[in-house]
Image: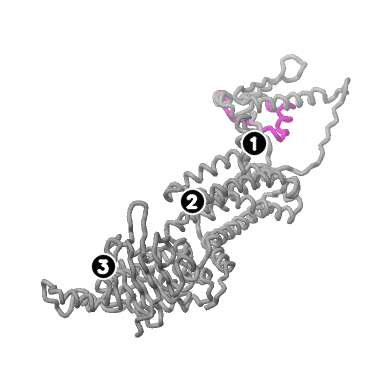
Amino acid sequence: MDKTNTIISVRNLVKNYADFTAVKGISFDVYENEIFGLLGPNGAGKTTTLEIIETLREKTSGEITVDGFSVDKDANEIKRIIGVQLQAAGYYPNLNLVELMELFAGLYGVDIKPMEMLEKVNLQDKAKAKFKALSGGQKQRFSIATTLLNSPKIIFLDEPTTGLDPQARRNLWDLIIDIRNNGTTVVLTTHYMDEAEQLCDRVAFVEHGEIIALDTPDNLIDQLINSGFERKKEVKKANLEDVFINLTGQEWREG
Amino acid sequence: MNKSYNNTKATLALAKASFRSITRSPSAVVFTLAFPLIFILVFGFLGGGGVKLDLAVAPGSDMQNPVIIALQHTSVIHLITDQSDIELHQRLEKGTIAGVIDVHKNIVDQPAYLANVKYTSASMDKGNILKSILNNLMYTLNTKDLKPSVAELKESTVHGRTYRTIDFILPGQLGFSLLSTGVFGTAFVFFSLRQTLVIKRFFATPVKRSSIILGEGLARIGFALIGALFIILIGHFFFHFTLIHGVTTVINMLLLSTIGVIVFMGFGFVVSGIAKSESTIPPISNIITLPQFLLSGTFFSIENFPNWLQPISRALPLTYLNDAMRQVAFEGAGLWDVKQQILIMVIWGIGIYAVAVKVFKWE
């Protein structure tokens, strides 16, 4: 894979709120067709950074380009080539999934077949259901389906697996990898390090509005080991999650 | 990738989605259709009878005499014959009957009968009507066989359109329906779309803010007009609501409804902007809708209000919508004839949207 084509470039991004600085001059690049992870504790500035790139929030200073478009001048061009999944976003009340898909098709100005989009995320059986009636995993899959409507070059997923059970989480990983394999760049945030390790080609650690490390998960782990770090307890060949999956099965649960 | 983005398509997609959502929302259907229809039903069945007077016949009164028989044939009078003296006295004090009549054969020959009538100060207005009905009745009975010596009264009635209660009530209810749809509907929708980040998700698409407002507005106006048409048709076919020029009158009423709902939506935008939480929307909306509901001639003509209250009534936009609706429906006025009312609504509209632009919040 060619990893040198930069699709998102962030330079010295600063975001001040009235009483504090959420982002303190961070810089990074996202390469075309990779899964890029922004990791860090709550309040570190991950979501703020993401929303500024998505053109949903004004920045205080810095330069950002997305596929050659500047967030200052070409916000509308950027919106047309990205897909955005917000943390805890709701959908228009009283509509079923097909109707919501039709709405988003209109908003993006694209012609799509709602059922085909739902099939992509395996929600065809829920076509007539309301968003509210979906399980956590189904909600996230639907949200991801809405990000794919305009065949975007980049999709942004803000904590897509928070609150999901292990099966739904693994299922979503497969979906995200599929999307990447179809040529879409994925930028996501997460609190789960096993997820980042499995999923992300490169990760950036964000803390107090600054990037404190950026590399592939492998390199970051190697660096730590080389510095003399050792786990207190010898790692076994399986962990408790493996036990859980082994006992309860791989298949999707719609609970 | 296709370079031209179609704002109209986005607006229409939003209007369609919003319209579907409104028709599935119980509160929208209740406020726009159910409440006004219930009021119309109640007043539709109540009205039409005009004034009714309850006149009690005292126990022991003679029943077989020309006075009582004549009273029984007077349509305005409802005779009560089965109550005791004590009950009648109580009802007189409360004013729930207009009076008590007691007729006796006279001991001497002339006149043949004596009629004692007791009125009540608790119901003076009805008492006065009763008094004139009785005077008229006595005069007719006493002069049956006499030629008038001074002048004879010849009465005739001009046949005009019957102004039914429904002709007053329906335009008022229509106005109320438009007011609640405009204020409550708009306020709740924009507040909840903002709270649940639906609007934020929209902003991540290329849609324009104006398309969001326009799409929502189209859906709400469409829904309000369907509601209005429904109310007008029910009123016309079931309660003989007067539509003087037929279809033209209906179209004029719908045009007035459009102006009305646009103005009232402005209030809704303001409420959605100033409400701090979902639970503060109903009280704030009620502050706007209730006074108009009560003071804008929805149920009673504002002429009946005390003088100090009338200027307030005449300041409210619903007063002018109701007034224009009544003139159009019953008197057959065209839109140009009610231009003054329309102008005042437009002025309200400009004012309220100026405030809405200041206080409206997107996120």
Name the colour scheme: one colour
Figure check: A179 above or below A162: below
Viewer-side label of 1, 2? 2
Q: Are marks 2 and 3 on the same chain?
A: no
| Of residues A217 and B267, the one drawn nearer to the viewer in this rendering | A217
> Tag 3, which secondary structure?
strand
Q: Taking the image as drawn, is residue B40 in sight? A: no
The stretch of residues the image draws in magenta is B62-85
Q: Earlier in the sequence, mark 1 or mark 2?
A: 2
| Of residues B148 and B213, the one drawn nearer to the viewer in this rendering | B213
Residue A162: horizontal and vertical position, in percent?
31, 67
Residue A65: horizontal and vertical position, in percent?
42, 71
Residue appearing at x 70%, y 21% in the figure: B115
Residue A245: horizontal and vertical position, in percent?
24, 77
Q: Amino acid at mark 3?
A: Ile
Which chain is indicated by disc 2?
B
Figure check: A92 above or below A222: above
> Tag 2, which secondary structure?
helix
Residue that mark 1 sits on:
B302
Q: Count the marks: how many?
A: 3
Task: Say whether residue B285 is magenta.
Answer: no
Residue that mark 2 sits on:
B272
Q: CA distance from mark 1 to mark 2?
A: 30 Å
Figure check: A104 above or below B32: below
Residue that mark 3 sits on:
A212
Q: Are marks 3 and 1 on the same chain?
A: no
Horizontal arrangement in the rendering, residue B28 relative to residue B166 (left or right): left
Which chain is indicated by disc 1?
B
Q: Taking the image as drawn, is residue A41 in sight? A: yes
